[in-house]
Image (cartoon, rainbow, N blue to C red):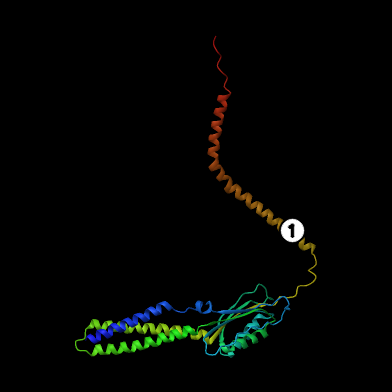
Amino acid sequence: MKRTFALLMTLGLTLAACSASDGESGPTTQADGLAGEEGALQAATPDATTTAGERVLVGLDLVDGRRVIRRASLELRASDTRSAYEDIVAMVEAIGGFVADATVFPTSGDDDQPQVSLTLRVPVDQLNATMTAIKALADEVVSESQGAEDVSEQFVDLEARLTNLQTLETELRALLEEVRRQENADPEKLLRVFNEVSSARGQIEQIQGQLDYLSDLTELATLEIQITQTPTTVPIVDEPWSPAEAVRDALRNLVSGLEAVADWAIGFALYALPMLLITIGPLALIGLVIYRRLFRKGHTAPAPIET
């Protein structure tokens, strides 16, 4: 029995140490994964000598044996944004990727093309080729960028902690069976061992979830795309001046001005003026009475002096 208690205490301390290590590391979130300080971002910006429409190539090579999160962005212009959007979706699905998010903004006119925003997930080894094919669909590449973050150390740390916890869980389950086989087993001891097993299992599932999340980020790159309509050519000569249209505009402005004046007069007569009479009228009447009394006293003739 003493051996059982000693083993239980040792395993409990080991589990507590694993829990503390878990708390220090903390879960890996998407914001930390994609915007970590170790991420190296390379952006393509045309210099002063770059002509309009010239392609600027940006690419990050894969590193063998490393776990890297890849992300990229493209800002494009196309004459037919809807057609470009449909071609991009078909292309990404053909290589085993998918559209994580897509927004087609409404247009102001029938001849206008909508602005399209896309978030794509593509196989990491197909990212550069996919970006090259997508740029070929556009009239102009406004901007292009790629970034990468090495998370290999996080993988090694999580996998090591997962192995230790799995070993601990196996030993705890063996101890649980040993306690159960004992005659007149203490229910309290049995419950303590069972709680230790449940705690180890919960930490294993948490770390496994972090590993699965990081694996998804490293196996599929994130590609964000903005597509806007190519600006149309502005005519050299503006539309001819129309006197009739100018007269109509002036009359519309006149009517609008008269309506505004009439609205103000009605509002003043029916609201502002009564409010002034109610609030200022009594004060003005009291002031007038006081003024008249003082004025009369000042002009009263002095009484004659008797000699």
Q: Is residue 259 found left or right of 184 in the rendered image?
A: right
- Determine whether 90 is above or below 243 in the image: below
Residue 66: percent from the left, percent from the top?
A: 52, 87
Who's the residue at 60% across and 50% down the image? Answer: 267
Q: Which amino acid does label 1 sit on?
A: Ala
Looking at this view, name the residue that lies furthest to the top. 307
Q: Nearer the viewer, residue 202 or 265?
A: 202
Where, by quadrant of the figure, is residue 185 drawn? bottom left
Depth check: give the residue in front, 93 or 75. Answer: 75
Residue 100, quarter of picture: bottom right
- Residue at 53% in and 35% down: 286
Point out residue 76 in the picture as x, y percentages from the top left corner: 66, 79
Q: In this view, does 26 lie to the left or right of 256?
A: left
Q: In this view, does 77 lie above or below 96?
A: above
Q: Where is residue 288 in the image (x, y as percent from the top left)?
A: 56, 33
- Pick out the residue farthest to the left: 184
Residue 259 at x, y = what percent?
Answer: 66, 54
Query: SS class of the residue under badge 1?
Result: helix
Say which quadrant the C terminus sits in: top right
In this rendering, is residue 241 above or below 258?
below
Q: How crowded is mark 1: few (under 14 residues within 10 Å), some or many (20 or more)?
A: few
Count the numbered circles shown: 1
Describe residue 17's horizontal placement relative to residue 53 as left or right. Answer: left
- Which residue is the site of mark 1? 250
Q: Which of 287 and 243 is in front in this view?
A: 287
| Residue appearing at x 25%, y 90% in the figure | 178
Q: Quadrant of the N terminus?
A: bottom left
Residue at 73% over, 58% down: 251
